[in-house]
């Protein structure tokens, strides 16, 4: 008997008759699952993945979801159940509980925030369902609550941006000038926001002439970033740098700066720093609108599949797996390079 089937039997025993009745009730009102589709007269056993995606707030997030969908296909032997939480941790917790009740084989969680996961992750562990955390992190006192994490080092991304700004200002002969920085943060308490903010905070602490003129939350969206940047410019007249925590925020900032009559980018007065390096973000960088774009690779589907394949063979994956990433300036980029990247 394979490990997968032993886990299924264990879960059925542990959950008991009460849970079985709940599953029946949920199945009556939920969309039908084609778990064992019969296409040629014989049942085909699918590996079922429950994927709790935090939302679709940005180009990066959309590419991340597409990577999962393109990897976990029926042709490859998977059924992917995707739940869009629309930036709500409560919806993610409810989705995870539903996945447990539906006896999925694995749960993949892209968490909206870092804290508050202990109870539901303990429920998944007790039910014998491995949880793989993807992209953003979770903070738990007991790291056995999840099987593995794969994603980016967000603090390292922030440090790369700060090192680049330090060198760029030296090249411009401005390293002794007072530098006014506007910071547009991402969704608060997400690991991306915490890491990229930490990088900038270290830069501010290490440069007495760097001054934080304003810090507002742009929620990783173009609309919110435009709104907060527009309001900042009503009272903050001197802006040397805008540090945006993703590309969509940078697009909103561009709009607000343009309306205020301020130039930005390679040949402008305002230095614009962004993160993610999506296709649209890199195109703006190539065109000189963004001075620096720090890569955050969203194509985690194949990485998650490697972890699951190892677990299927009763292997033990690394607890943490970092993605290798880089930074881009306008002169680094061509249309061909941007197309080849795939997102």
Image: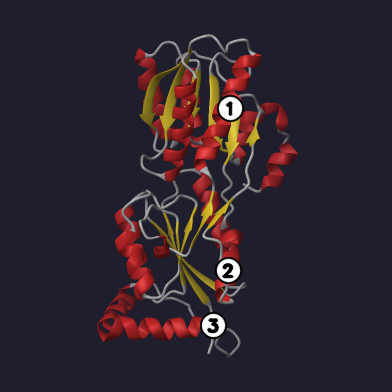
Disc marking residue 181 = none
Secondary structure of the residue carrying numbered label 3: loop
**Quarter of the image where one finds residue 283:** top right
Mark 2 or mark 1: which comes first in sequence? 2
> Taking 158 as reference, is 150 above or below it?
below
**Which residue, given by chain and number where applicable, does mark 3 sit on?**
45
Residue in view at x 62 percent, y 29 percent: 285
Mark 3 nearby-residue class (10 Å; few <14, some 14–19, many ≥20): few
Binning the other alpha carbons within 10 Å of mark 1 as few (below 14), some (14 to 19) or many (20 upward) gives few
Residue 321's spot in the image, x, y percent? 56, 55
- Residue tagged 2: 73
Which one is in front, 142 or 201?
A: 142
Distance (Cα) linking label 2 and label 3: 13 Å
Q: Is residue 309 left or right of residue 236?
A: right
Marked residue nearer the N-terminal end (1 or 3): 3
Q: Position of residue 331 (x, y in %)?
A: 71, 27
The residue lying toward the viewer, choosing from 333 and 170, is 170
Q: Is residue 220 visible?
A: no
Q: Are marks 1 and 3 in contact (CB under 8 Å)?
A: no
| Position in image of residue 259 (x %, y %) | 46, 18
Q: Residue at x 37, y 69 (%)?
A: 124
**How far apart in space, not on screen, are marks 2 and 1 (Cα)?**
41 Å
* Nearest-to-viewer mark from 2 and 1: 1
Q: Earlier in the sequence, mark 2 or mark 3?
A: 3
Residue 281 seen in this snapshot: yes
Disc 1 from disc 3: Cα separation: 51 Å
The residue where tag 1 is placed is 163
Which residue occupies the foreground of this view, 335 or 87?
87
């Amino acid at each position: 008997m394979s490990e997968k089937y032993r886990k299924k039997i264990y879960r059925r025993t542990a959950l008991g008759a009460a849970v079985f009745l709940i599953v029946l009730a949920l199945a009556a009102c939920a969309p039908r699952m084609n778990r064992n589709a019969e296409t040629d007269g014989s049942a085909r056993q699918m590996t079922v993945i429950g994927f709790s995606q935090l939302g679709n707030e940005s180009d990066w997030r959309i590419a991340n979801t597409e990577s999962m969908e393109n990897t976990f296909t029926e042709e490859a032997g998977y059924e992917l159940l995707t739940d869009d939480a629309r930036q709500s941790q409560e919806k993610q917790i409810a989705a995870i509980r539903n996945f447990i009740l539906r006896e999925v084989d694995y749960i993949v969680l892209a968490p909206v925030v870092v804290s508050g996961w202990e109870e539901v992750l303990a429920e998944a562990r007790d039910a014998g369902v491995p949880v793989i955390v993807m992209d953003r992190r979770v903070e738990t006192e007991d790291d056995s609550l999840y099987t593995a994490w794969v994603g980016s080092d967000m603090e390292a991304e922030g440090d790369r941006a700060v090192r680049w700004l330090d060198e760029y200002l030296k090249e411009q002969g401005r390293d002794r000038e007072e530098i006014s920085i506007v910071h547009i943060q991402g969704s608060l308490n997400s690991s991306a926001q915490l890491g990229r903010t930490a990088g900038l905070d270290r830069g501010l602490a290490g440069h007495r002439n760097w001054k934080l003129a304003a810090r507002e939350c742009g929620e990783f969206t173009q609309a919110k970033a435009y709104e907060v940047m527009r309001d900042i410019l009503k009272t903050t007249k001197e802006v040397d740098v805008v540090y945006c925590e993703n590309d969509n925020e940078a697009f909103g900032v561009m709009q607000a700066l343009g309306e205020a009559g301020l130039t930005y980018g390679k040949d402008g007065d305002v230095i614009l720093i962004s993160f993610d390096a999506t296709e649209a973000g890199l195109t703006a960088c190539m065109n000189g609108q963004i001075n620096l774009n720090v890569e955050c690779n969203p194509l985690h589907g194949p990485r998650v599949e490697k972890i699951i394949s190892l677990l299927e063979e009763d292997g033990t994956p690394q607890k943490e797996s970092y993605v290798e990433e880089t930074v881009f300036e306008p002169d680094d980029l061509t249309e061909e390079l941007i197309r080849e990247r795939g997102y």
